[in-house]
Image (cartoon, helix red, strand yellow):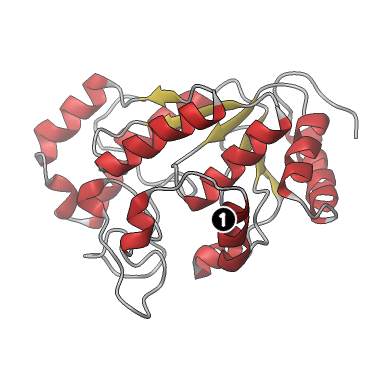
Amino acid sequence: MRPLDAKFNAIDGSSAAAYLAGSLAGIDSLEGRIAEIARAITGTIAFSTSLGLEDQAILHAVAETGAAVDIFTLDTGRHFPETLDTLAQSEQRYRLRIRFLAPAAEDLERLVARDGVGGFRLSVEARKACCDVRKVRPLERGLKSAAAWITGLRRGQSSGRALVPFAEWDAEHGLIKLNPIADWSVGQLEAYIAANDVPVNPLHARGFPSIGCQPCTRAIRPGEDIRAGRWWWENEDGKECGLHKRPAALAGAQA
């Protein structure tokens, strides 16, 4: 594949994504996959980390390979203290800085004025509007100049993610979306973390396999899906925050 500078166009991006999907599938190690991404992509490679198990594994591989990756996390203002502690521990362990992207003050003030501090519980639409302001819009800022976006999506996380590819053209953001552990089972993930002594959020050991904002996350019960603790008061079908499935925009909010 011929590396391209800056942002891809749709034709080149789709071709590059198809190439990378094939090449990543043929590489066994996560470090090898990260190295291949760094080799193939010319331009900014962004990695948005939630500090969950998947993203911590990727963070370790990025640090091990020394790949030039712009690492950031979304500061929703509602993180568990344990999540922030995991962030600090990771920065110290890997000797790198993870950028914080916060919501725009005017968007957040408008949202709270309309729905109240706890308005995300009023309806699915209100919850998605909250996610849009606190997560989706900051993500868009973080990806604005990126040529590629690394995520920790796995096919085993939920039925809605069962077909996650290693690489795909993301037309909405105009970049290549890369999922280097798309084919990993939870067993593979846990084994990698244990073998490499990767820092993890202590909430995982307390029944929180998927951790988001504190008001919107609970521990799961035996036998529940690993994402059942996210927005548990909603129906189980297709629950997403909008980072990987665009929600309806907040009515009246400016772009």
Residue at left offset 28%, top offset 64%: 219
71 vs 176, nearest the viewer = 71
Q: Within 10 angstroms of label 1, few (less than 14), some, or many (20 or more) residues?
A: few
Q: Which residue is mark 1?
A: 194
Q: Nearer the viewer, residue 235 or 180?
A: 180
State the image coordinates of residue 140 (x, y, percent, origin top left): 47, 29
Amino acid residing under circle 1: Ala
| Residue 175 seen in render | no
Left or right of residue 127: residue 1: right
Residue 238 visible: yes
Residue 87: percent from the left, percent from the top? 41, 34
Residue 89, above or below 119: above
Instruction: Tell whether 199 sits left or right of 19.
Output: left
The quadrant of the image that shows the C terminus is top left
97 or 118: nearer the viewer: 97
Q: Position of residue 234 (x, y in %)?
A: 25, 65
Residue in view at x 85 percent, y 26 percent:
3
In the drawing, does residue 197 fall left or right of residue 7?
A: left
| Secondary structure category for the residue under label 1 | helix
Residue situated furthest bottom in the rendering:
223
Q: Position of residue 98 (x, y in %)?
A: 48, 26
**Residue 150, picture quadrant:** top right
Picture layout, residue 242 above or below residue 232: above
